[in-house]
Amino acid sequence: MPWLELSIRCSRRDWPRIESALEEIGALSVTLLDAEDEPILEPGPGETPLWRELSANALFEAGADRRGITAVLQELVPWLDPARLVFREVADADWSRAWMDQYRPMRFGRRLWIYPSTIEPAQDADTVVVRLDPGLAFGTGTHPTTALCLAWLDGLDLAGASVLDYGCGSGVLAIAALKLGATRAVGVDNDPQALQASRDNAGRNGVSSALTLLAPDADGIGIHPVVVANILAGALVALEPVLAAACARGGRIALSGILRGQAEEVLAAYAPDFDELAVETLEDWVRITGRRMP
């Protein structure tokens, strides 16, 4: 069925009042977008920041009364300019399937490919295939930070190794490591949706029994010869003691989710415990690799 979408341009200060009004008039869902290309790169723990200028898109049933919605909004939010209210009809769609139709196989390194579940890979003995539907979690391989980590994993000899994927998102890095020869992987994430996406993707790739999924405060993270963390620079700096403790002496680490201008801070944080530190860039993003000092 089609839907009626109402778009409202408003400020961060005005949003709480408008949000309450939309709930009052029966909006089925509301999506917030950045109205002025203002990046929010790294919110602090527990923070949910908003942009200064917002575009709020509210969905109503197709038969909703536009004039009635406008009148009630003006009553509940008297200072709201009617010129900022834009209505349009939108067709119903399976948005996850529509996205998947645009998702194509991608190669990382020499052997590793990421395939959506909608496309059957060619049979090739030298190809390692990860089947992935990212769901609600970060990590499809399309982002440079994920691509940098996948290429790094492809270049390692992972036969018989255990791997820690800290900030596992969709589970793509842990699953790729297992498909590349690791015998065990641990994925850690503080988002329950990420852990569920990782669980689903592990099942799709037949590696569920080799993948342990944990919250950051859980026991059992262990010590691993290979550690990869694709999160954000500030979190990587704060987590250095945790990741150093989880990386076996002489083991390898890869850190990603770092913008070019943030690399020096991360390098300085990891230099006391890691040597052979190296930087690789892709577009505006950086991957740092190193060896845990013996």
Image: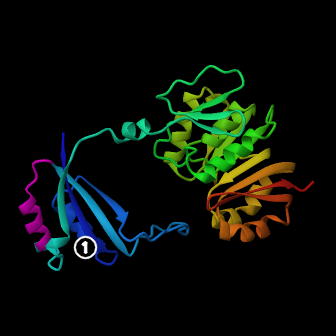
* Secondary element at image label 1: helix
Between 130 and 18, the one lying in front of the other is 130
Q: Quadrant of the C terminus?
A: bottom right
Between 155 and 80, the one lying in front of the other is 155
Q: Position of residue 151 (x, y in %)?
A: 70, 44
Q: Residue at x 63, y 47 (%)?
A: 147
Q: Position of residue 241 (x, y in %)?
A: 76, 62
Mark 1 neighbour density, 10 Å: few (under 14) some (14–19) many (20 or more)? few
Q: Residue at x 54, y 44 (%)?
A: 140
Q: Which residues are magenta?
A: 62-74
Q: Quadrant of residue 88?
A: bottom left
Q: Residue at x 66, y 66 (%)?
A: 260
Q: Position of residue 150 (x, y in %)?
A: 67, 43
User: In the rendered view, would you say 43 is above or below 142?
Assistant: below
Q: Residue at x 38, y 76 (%)?
A: 52
User: In the rendered view, would you say 244 is above or below 219?
Assistant: below
> For this view, does 139 lie left or right of residue 90?
right
User: In the rendered view, would you say 52 is above or below 242?
Assistant: below
- Disc 1 marks a residue whose amino acid type is Arg
Question: In the current view of this chain or complex, which residue is farthest to the right?
Answer: 294
Name the residue tied to disc 1.
Answer: 17
Q: Quadrant of residue 262?
A: bottom right
Q: Total number of numbered labels?
A: 1
Q: Is residue 272 magenta?
A: no
Q: Quadrant of the N terminus?
A: top left
> For this view, does 277 lie left or right of residue 195?
right
Q: Report whether residue 219 is seen.
A: no
Q: Position of residue 33 (x, y in %)?
A: 36, 63
Q: Report whether residue 290 is seen.
A: yes
